[in-house]
Image: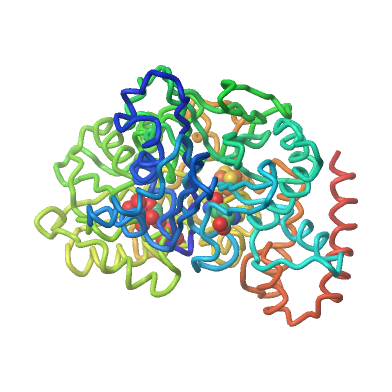
Amino acid sequence: MRDLAEECGVVAVYHFSSDTVSPLCPGGPDSAPTLIPRMLLDIQNRGQLAAGITRFNDRHSHLLLTYKNVGTVAEVFALSQRDRFEELMKNFAGRAAIGHVRYATCGKDDPSYAQPFERHHIRKHKWFSFAFNGQIANFPELRERLLRDEDNHLVRNTDTEVIMHVLCRELNPNPAPDLADVCRAFPREFDGAYSMVFLNALGELMVVRDPLGFKPLSWACDGSLFAAASESVALLNLGFAPEMIKPVAPGQAIIVSEKGIRFVQFATAPHRAHCFFEWIYFSNVASTLDGRSVYLARKALGEELARLETVPVDDGKTIVVPVPDTSKAAADAMAYALRVPCLEGLIRNRYTGRTFIESNLNRDAKARAKYTPLREVLEGKRVLLVEDSIVRSTTMRVLIHRMRELGKPAEIHVRVACPPIVSPCFYGIDMSSMGELFAPRYLKNGEITEEIQAQMARDLGADSLRYLPVEAVARAIGIDANDLCRACITGVYPTPWGQKLAEEARRRWREGIAGRTYDVEEQSLTTGLSCSERVAEEMEFDSKAKSELARSR
Ligand SMILES: O=P(O)(O)OC[C@H]1O[C@H](OP(=O)(O)OP(=O)(O)O)[C@H](O)[C@@H]1O
Ligand SMILES: NC(=O)CC[C@H](N)C(=O)O
Ligand code: SF4
C-alpha cells in the first residue's frame, strides 16, 4: 500500500585503513562501498521507491560521490547486469559509504527526493552527504521558520531538505565544529523520528538515532570493518556474528574516523518510544530490534490471538490461513496453539513486492493482482484469516471478495494480530490523516466492542472480525509499554508536535480536508488558503495546542 506508505532504510560502512583486510569485505578496504547494494537489498522491505549511495575517497577529486535514482535496489544498481554494476561500482571505490532506500512520507516520488542528499562545499568539513529514516513532526514549523527569511529558498517540500539546512548551519563555524556538537543541536530543532547516516569530505562517518529511538538502527564492528543498518538482518547477512550486532542507543551518535570509533550520548530522554509497528509489520522478520526478535514478537502475537479464539476448532473444518507474507509467523503460532492446520489458502505473487510501498495509484487493482485464493485449500472450510494489520482495509476488502468468489470457503473469520489503527502517524509511516484509516469511522473515540467488530466484519464481507487488545502489543514484543510508541493505536503521542498534529488531523477530518496533515504545500492546495492566511491559522492553532498542553501537564 503506498496508501500506507512505508519507511526508509539506511546503511553505512567504514573500512579502517589498517593492514588487516576485513574478511567481511574480501575485495579490500576500497571495496567497502560495494557492500552497500547488498545491504540495501536486505532492507528493501523498508522502501522500494528509490535507492542511493554516497562514497568517500580521498584519492579522488570528488571526495564524496553520490549516485541515486528511483526504482528498487536491483533496478538502481543494475544488479542483474553484471557489467553495468561493475562499471558503476568502479567510480565508487573508497573506504566509507552510506546508502538509503526510500519510501516517501512527505514530498514527491521523483528522483530529486531520493537520498542521500549531498551538499557540496569547498571546505571539507562543510561538504557532506546524509540519509535518514523517519519523519520530522515539526517540519511545517521548521520550513516556515526558514522561509520567513526572504533570502531563503527551499527547492523541495520535504523534511530531508530542512534537515540538510540545519546541518549546514550547525557546520558553518570555522574551524570545523565537533560532530558531537552538531548532534547536540538536533533535540532543540527536531521533534520526531530520525535514524540518520552522515558522511563528510574529511572522511568522517556518523550514525545518529533520535533521543526517543523511534526507528531502529543497529551497528557492528569486527576488526577493521564498521557497519550500521536500519535493521540487524543487513549486518547479519554481511557476516557479523549475532552477538556483535548492537542497537544504536536512543540519543546516541557513533562517530567513525581513522582515529577510531567514538560514542556520544548527545541527548537523554526519560523513556523511549520505539515504533511498535516495526515488530508488527515493517521490519524484516529475520531482524532483532532493540534486543527483541521480530519473529518472536509476531509468534507471541499469534499466541495472543489463539487465547481469544472462540470458533469451534475440533470438528475438522477449521483452518488458519495467513495473509502472506508478514502475518505468516503469527498465523503459524496461532494454528499451533489451537491445534489446527495452518495452510496456504492465499498464494502471493512473489514478484510484486509490498503493495504498501507502491505508488498510490490503483491500489485495489494491485491487491487483486497480488493474491490468488486456492480453492483446493479453502472450499467448505471455516477459515481463520490472519492479517498483521488493517490500516485502510484495501487489502482485506479485496481478499475477502476474491476468497469468496474463487475459494468458496464456508466461513471467513478475520483475526488481526494488531489493535485497531485509530490515529495517524507523524513519525515516518505514511498514514498521517484520519480520513484514510478504516477503524476511526467506527470507533468515534469510543472503545472497540463486540458489536463494533461485528459491524466492521459485515462491512468487509467477513463472518466475524477480531483485533488484539492494545495491552497485547507490549506483552508480545517484550518491551515496557512506556518505552514503545503506540500513538496510532492509543491516540497518545510521545512528543508535543505529535499531539498537536493529531488535533490538526482531527480538525481536517471533520472539515473533510484530504492530504498529509504535515504537508504544507498539499494543505495550501487543498484548503485554498494563501500563505499568510495559513500562517495566521497555524498561529491560532499553535496557541490552542500550547494551552491544551499546558492544561494536560
Ligand atoms: O489495510 P491496508 O491499508 O490494505 O493495509 C494493510 C495491509 O498492507 C500490508 O501488506 P503488504 O502488501 O505491504 O504486504 P506484505 O505483508 O506482503 O509485505 C499488510 O501486511 C496488510 O496486508
Ligand atoms: N520513510 C522515511 O523515512 C522517509 C524519509 C523522508 N521523510 C522522505 O520522505 O524521504
Ligand atoms: S504512530 Fe504508530 S506507526 Fe507511527 S511511530 Fe508511533 S507506533 Fe509507529
Q: Quadrant of residue 209?
A: top right
- Name above or below for residue 297 compared with residue 87: above
Compared across the picture, whether 396 is left or right of 279 comes to left
Q: Residue furthest bottom?
A: 528
Q: Position of residue 249 (x, y in %)?
A: 60, 26
Q: Position of residue 536 (x, y in %)?
A: 88, 70
Q: Quadrant of residue 537?
A: bottom right
Q: Residue at x 60, y 28 (%)?
A: 254
Nearest the viewer among 296 and 78 is 78
Nearest the viewer among 195 and 358 is 195
From this viewpoint, is residue 413 visible?
Answer: no
Q: How many marks?
A: 0
Q: Residue at x 53, y 50 (%)?
A: 62
Nearest the viewer among 154 and 403 is 154
Q: Position of residue 245 (x, y in %)?
A: 44, 23
In the picture, the quarter occupied by the N terminus is: bottom left
Nearest the viewer among 159 and 36 is 36
From this viewpoint, is residue 230 visible?
Answer: yes
- Name above or below for residue 440 compared with residue 480: below
Compared across the picture, whether 37 is left or right of 278 comes to left
State the colouring used for the structure image: rainbow
Q: Quadrant of residue 105?
A: bottom right
- Name above or below for residue 390 compared with residue 208: below
Q: Position of residue 331 (x, y in %)?
A: 29, 41
In the picture, the quarter occupied by the C terminus is: top right
Q: Residue at x 62, y 22 (%)?
A: 262
